[in-house]
Amino acid sequence: MAEQQLGVLKAMDVAKTQLYHFTAIVIAGMGFFTDAYDLFCVSLVTKLLGRLYYFNPDSAKPGTLPPHVAAAVNGVALCGTLAGQLFFGWLGDKLGRKKVYGITLIMMIVCSVASGLSFGNKAKGVMTTLCFFRFWLGFGIGGDYPLSATIMSEYANKKTRGAFIAAVFAMQGVGILAGGFVALAVSSIFDKQFPAPIYSVNRALSTPPQADYIWRIIVMFGALPAALTYYWRMKMPETARYTAL
């Protein structure tokens, strides 16, 4: 039995680079892309959240998130990521990479949308529900991060493993850049459709109510690349290295 397992592993190491290798790069790379977008896009909307929900008409400056709220909004997903890495790393060894890979993706899609649909129009309700769903979004990301890297490393042969994993990890930077582009695009569209005076001219009208849609769209956009790759993730076979062991 041990010799058969060793034979499978050796065969995988010397296998020629084929189309399924590049398919795995795209699928795992989109996982890293989505993870990075979801984790870092919230930092682009915190100022807008402050202006919307912590507006003080008597203040000479636009509203800002209180320090503890800003820390929670920006950091709660990272706390979930830590917990998710520990849990899904263990679960991936027990149930297999493919099955857990699908679970993490569904969790990311649901929590991305739910984060953008945070309940209410009062600061306490919106921030509480946003942090709640951001934690579970991070929990799913915590599983997706290591599984994407593991699946790619187990699919790759010995000669190209380093290059393939580097290509997958490079998508993290692309995801961060995409967050900036999406934020700029959505903000520009709303600025043209709903022009508003600057804060020093009219404090109350400087942030139109339609601006509440901006941060929600930016946050929910992270569900799109995840949803687009769901079918292909489910079509991926379990990695041969995991099956052999």
Image: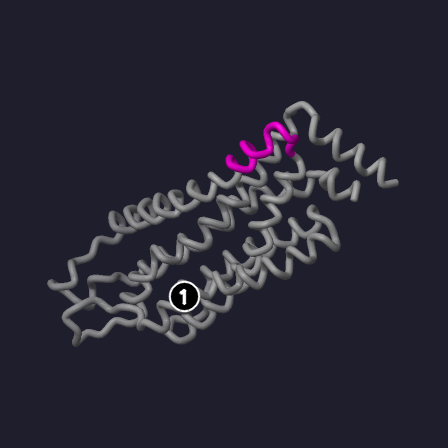
Instruction: Label 1, secondary structure: give it.
Output: helix
Colour basis: one colour
Quarter residue 244 falls in: top right
Residue closest to the far right: 1
Which residue does the image show at 51% across and 61% down from the upper left? 114
The residue shown at (42%, 40%) is 174
Quarter of the rendering containing residue 175: top left
Residue 132: image location, x then y, percent:
50, 68
Left or right? Give the position of 8 relative to 189: right
Q: How many marks?
A: 1
x and y percent of residue 216 in the render? 41, 58
Q: Nearer the viewer, residue 2 or 61?
A: 2
* 201 in magenta: no
Over which residues does the magenta segment extend? 156-167
Task: From the viewer's side, name the closer residue of 184 and 195.
Answer: 184
Please state, as top left, top right, bottom left or bottom right, where the C terminus lies in the image. Answer: top right
Query: Residue 66 at x, y = what percent?
Result: 31, 73
User: For the residue marked with disc 1, what is the amino acid?
Assistant: Val
Considering the image in quadrants, where does the N terminus appear? top right
Which of the two residues, 26 or 62, is positioned nearer the viewer here? Answer: 26
For the residue carrying disc 1, how many other residues have a C-alpha within 10 Å: few (<14), some (14-19), or many (20+)? many
Closer to the camera, 111 or 97? 97
Residue at the image position 46 percent from the left and 69 percent from the top: 119
**Residue at mark 1:** 73
Classify 75 as above or below 8.
below
* Residue 220 percent location from the top left of the image: 46, 54
The answer to whether 155 appears left or right of 41 in the picture is right
